[in-house]
Amino acid sequence: MIIKKFQGKTESEATEAAKKELGSGVVIMNVRTVKRKGLAGLFRAPITEVTVALEAEPEKAVAKTESEREKAVLNPVEKKEEPPKQMTALEQLALQQRKLAEQGAVITPAPNMSQIIPDNRQDTLEEKLDSLEHLLKERLEEKRESDVKSDASSSNNEGQKDEEQIKFTKLLYNTMLDNEVHEKYANQIIEDAEKTKKPNMPFDYMLTNIYQKMILKFGNPSTITPAPKGVKVVYFVGPTGVGKTTTIAKIASKLCVEEKRKVALLTADTYRIAAAEQLRTYANILEVPFRIIYSPSEVEQSIEEFKDYDFILVDTAGHSHHNEEQRNNTNLIIHAASDIAESEVYLVLSATTKYRDLVSIADTYREMSDYKIIFTKLDETTCFGNILNLKLYTGRELSYVTYGQNVPEDIDRFNPQSTVKSILGGNS
């Protein structure tokens, strides 16, 4: 695994530099703004730094680390020192940040990471990770004491290390299952880790390896961007009760207020008067046009009317994915203007929905269109395994997540890092 930082005037420029050096297969792990140093920095624009990752095998570094750790563990009496402290993955990241800080760099967390996991759950998440690492440390200390007191042969020591690796792997596997990762995908992750496992590999390296591989499986989030030319039509589809209308209002607010884009709102949900009135209210607050459409032809009329706008956001009727008539109506709406304007479809799903139902819903909408996924109601669950499950099942890009009713605050782009930390944190 290669992890490297690149800087540029914008995120795009830094990302392009990363791709130029490492190739197009890089995955963005973090983006942050860095203030320039010195007095001159007060009058110059900050720069953007991106941290990227690329699959690689750091065999030499691992071998060296393993050799040093093995030597320290097998000969503690000769050195008359305490065995070297096993650094956790989080401690390794902290050490890297301290080194950067000593060089004058400004260290900041991932953008809006506290919003992905609400503030009232941050402490719980860290406690879960600390608990997991604390358990591993206890097992390591027990093993070290046993090595010092016993005169067992080297082969016995190797057997103990292998046994501890198996226990550690099982602990991670059970932790993923506790967080509702499907057994099939938990097995895949463990099998991937086993392929790169080396004899006597430190536990913290194994944990970091799995953490990074899971982030790569999620990939980069894909959010709404303008069309190269003309207006872009964005459709939001999904079952009833997942929060589509509120999600559209949050996205419209960000596009209008933060990005200064021209946005029009349409609704094809003529089944629920309350939904149309709710979206109308948000349109009035944002001072953007609002229309109710009753047929596919009205989508074309709206595109002609708002052709000078950046986005047209369309709220479709929420319905059961088993309702064939409503499903066909939605299909006609989202394909009504495919020949005259660029369009995207976002499938809105609740993180609290059972995995079996998520699969059924995803399969239904797969027949209609290519789509990206938005997960809502992250504040109503403590297990995020289904997000990983559906990503691996569908192969579709993840986009936004929401975690409350506040407009526009309770929404952000999907954050793979915080999600993986939660999945590996276990249950209290």
Image (spheres, rainbow, N blue to C red):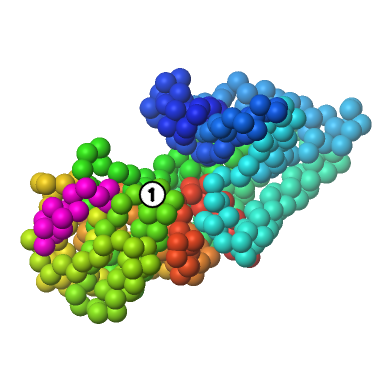
Expressed as whole percent of the image width and height from the top left, the position of residue 96 reads 68, 33
Q: For this rendering, which residue is in front, 215 or 338?
A: 338
Image check: 408 left or right of 278?
Answer: right
Residue extending furthest bottom?
273
Local secondary structure at mark 1: loop
Counting from the top left corner in percent of width and height, residue 246 is at: 37, 67
Circle 1: residue type: Lys
- Residue nearer the viewer, 17 or 215: 17
* Magenta segment boundaries in residue numbering: 298-311
Query: Where is residue 105, by image quadrant?
Result: top right
Q: Which residue is depicted at the point 24% across and 55% down?
A: 312
210 or 71, which is in the foreground?
210
- Name the image quarter holding the C terminus: bottom right
Residue that protrudes farthest toward the left in the picture: 297
Q: Is 111 within the magenta?
A: no
- x, y percent for residue 43: 62, 31
- Provide residue 166's location: percent of width, then percent of height: 59, 45
In this figure, which residue is indicated by the disc labeled 1?
Answer: 260
Residue at image coords 47%, 32%: 10
Q: Residue at x 26, y 42 (%)?
A: 227
Displayed quadrant of residue 367: bottom left
Residue 158 visible somewhere in the drawing:
no
424 vs 80: above or below: below
Q: In this view of the protein, can residue 425 be seen by the observer?
A: yes
